Amino acid sequence: MCHQVDNVPTIRYFTLLDFKKFLRKLEGKPFQSYQELCNSDVRYDSFSLHFIHIQGSPGAVPASVVQLTVTSKYISLPEWTASSPARKIATKDFILRTFNETTKCHARQNRGVDGSGSFQPLIIPQQVLSRNIVRLSPEAFSISFRISLPASRSNTILGCEAVMMLSVELPTIVEATKKKLLDHSKLRSFCETVEDMLFLQKELAAKKLVAFIGDNSLLARESGISDRPAQNNVVPFKAPQELAVSLELPNGGKIRGLGVRTGVTVLIGGGFHGKSTLLNTIARGIYPHIPGDGRERTISDKNSVVICSEEGRSVRDVDISGFISTLPDSSDAKKFNTQNASGSTSEAASIIENICAGAQLLLIDEDCSATNFLIRDRYMRKLIPDDPIIPLLDRVRELYEKNNISTLLIASGSSDYIGVADQVIAMRNYKPVCMDNQSKVLDIPRYHYVHEPLTIKDNRRVLEDNFDPSYENRRLQKTVPVRIKPLRGQEKNILEFGKDLLDLTKLSALIDSDQLSTIGYALFFARKKIIGKMRLSPSELATIVIDTIEKEGLDSLQIENAYPLFFSQIRTIELAGAMNRLRSLNIYRDTE
Ligand code: ADP
Ligand code: MG
């Protein structure tokens, strides 16, 4: 692997002709000879390619990293692409998607052994995130991407295949990308859509809203494992008059849709009528969506978070006494500590942790919650008067009235929540219906108990010795100084972090595997640069790291003398969520 250490690296420049000759000469040589390419720069007719990192073996993960640069002489983007921060994020995302699509279209993959001889396009989600791999300036744009250099079974270089990839396919991909970028109307609508939704997100609070779903949005997804739009028979969303709001967008003019108000919103409806789909839309609405997704006119409070039960997770010293008054082993619910939480205790801890991390809207689906955490009916309260669980039903108004935390909850199995709701929405045949009046007609009582006030305060402090990314590889009998990588071959969001296997599957706002790596390196950054100096709670620590990223860019997480990593935008909520789930989290409590 080539890393640039200390001294300034010298760049080796190639013309395309020389580059082809060079690759042909490598034919049949040991794979390691590709290292000679490291830090070289190839000048094509209308772009250049820089080799940043060369993989050590054909199947290596990550593969080689290259950076493509196209100067404005060859493609000039209109000025409006850079006229606001939102447009810049959108333009970069658009360029990346376009490059990705044309790569998939024009590249022949797997030319060599172990999947080598492939371009490795990213899997990009339906949402627009800021990333470090696309750079944009008035002079040029550049994209970093991964490529696996071709090798034979005997681990030797397939130089002629490399020539095909880099001197025939790559220019075709770049030309096709440039051609697509010349269609300014598509780029403009992309930029305007993203800008409109980010604008609306900032407006929500002033309008006392936590989410907005525009009329004619198409919320249904392709399948339970795909976030892409469903293709057939999708019922368009339409807000009923009582729930409708009309808002003015900077580009799109007036827009009508459902405004979910601050406070307690209860979502009811028959099975399979679209309740979870609506809640998931609101959960994903923390980020703007791409045009054509169906949800491009939906947006939510940027601090919305899904709360669900997560049996088996680790909880470190969290004060869950507001929800669980006593624990059977007489341990202190004010410092709840376990490596194996139950449904209700995990959910209680998650609410407290998320509120500390800045959550403003809690999204709860009864399908993914512990029932005894959500409700206890009046007869059950009489039968088991000493149940230590204080159900969310008893706290949900207090959360809003005292802490300004809104909740949107799917509760179709019990009417109890209707009594404490500000807004009741039923989903009927995939369409929302306002049920505020019906609940009054039925005269559903406000049925909840009053308890000691809930205190939400995190006096846990992260100790200096935390977030150690090193890993002892017993088989190789050596210590790997940094092991931070998403677990391979997994649908789930699991991060190998040092000795820990950090399961972040329940953090539903993680939509991209680069976010997982970003979390890992953000933890390492916290260890190296921040923890020692201050006595901070996990949320305070996460806030400082995210503030630094916002000010100095995602590349502030890069490690010196290592190949550049691909990062994408994350929130304080997920970073704090990762800290709180680390089984090795090392904390102490400040005096009360
Ligand atoms: P619920 O939570 O009410 O049981 P879901 O949200 O899980 O229902 O939706 C049930 C099914 O209907 C899912 O397969 C979902 O993809 C589909 N669906 C959701 N919204 C729509 C829609 N607007 N048009 C068509 N199908 C939809
Ligand atoms: Mg459901």
Image: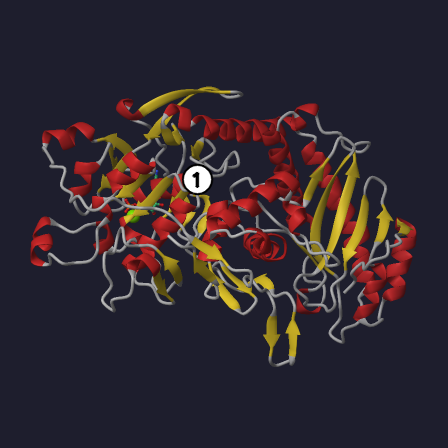
Q: Give percent across and percent down for residue 349.
A: 35, 54
Q: Is residue 124 left or right of residue 410?
A: right
In terms of image quadrants, where is residue 505? bottom left
Pinpoint residue 188: horizontal percent, then vertical percent. 61, 27
Q: Residue furthest front?
A: 591
At label 1, the amino acid type is Asn
Looking at the rendering, which quadrant does residue 172 occupy?
top right
Residue at 60 percent of width and 55 percent of height: 521
Q: Nearer the viewer, residue 307 or 245?
A: 307
Picture quarter containing residue 483? bottom right
Q: Is residue 255 left or right of residue 24?
A: left
Q: Residue at x 58, y 64 (%)?
A: 468
In this rendering, the answer to whether 164 lies above or below 240 is below
- Give the crowd class for mark 1: few <14, some 14-19, many >=20 residues within 10 Å: some
Residue occupying the point 16% across, 58% down: 387
Q: What colouring style does the render use? A: secondary structure
Left or right: 317 with respect to 105?
left
Query: Would residue 415 be visible to someone looking at this image?
Result: no
Residue placed under numbered mark 1 in the picture: 303
Please tell me whether mark 1 sits on a helix, a strand or a loop: loop
